[in-house]
Amino acid sequence: MKITPEVVEYVAYLARLELEPPEVELYAAQLDRILEYMDTLNRLDTEGIEPTSHAVPIVCVLREDEVRAS
């Protein structure tokens, strides 16, 4: 998908942002590069790789809740 300056202007309009013409061109180029990179990532073979929510295991450092007499 190619991000055009018209798309950037439309999204800016929806977000009620006022962008100068150089900003529109800059953001269009940056967003286009991001989407190109996402296409590259989508082509990777991830068959057999388990999905993760974090890069490293997370351990809760808090103690377990216990019911005690107060």
Image (cartoon, rainbow, N blue to C red):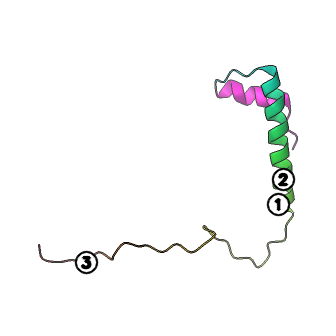
Secondary structure beneath dot 3 equals loop
Per the rendering, the mark at residue 66 is: 3
**x, y (%) of residue 68?**
17, 78
- Could you give the CA–CA distance between mark 1 and mark 3, rounded to whole angstroms? 46 Å
The secondary structure type at the circle numbered 2 is: helix
- Closer to the N terminus: mark 2 or mark 3? 2
Q: Please tell me which residue is depicted at 43% across the width and 73% down the height of the picture.
A: 60
Residue 32 found in image quarter:
top right
Q: Earlier in the sequence, mark 1 or mark 3?
A: 1
Tell me the crowding category of disc 3: few under 14, some 14 to 19, or many 20 or more residues within 10 angstroms, Cα based. few
Q: Mark on residue 41?
A: 1
Q: Is residue 60 left or right of residue 34?
A: left
Residues drawn in magenta = 1-15
Task: Point out the image quarter for the C terminus.
Answer: bottom left
Residue at 78%, 30% in the rendered image: 8
Question: Amino acid type of disc 3?
Answer: Glu
**Secondary structure of the residue carrying numbered label 1:** helix
- Which residue has dot 2 on it? 37
Q: Which mark is residue 18?
A: none
Please identify the residue farthest to the front as the structure is shown: 61
Magenta highlight on residue 35: no
Residue 54 point in image, percent of width and height? 60, 68
Q: In front: 66, or 1? A: 66
Tell me whether circle 2 and circle 1 mark residues in contact (CB < 8 Å): yes
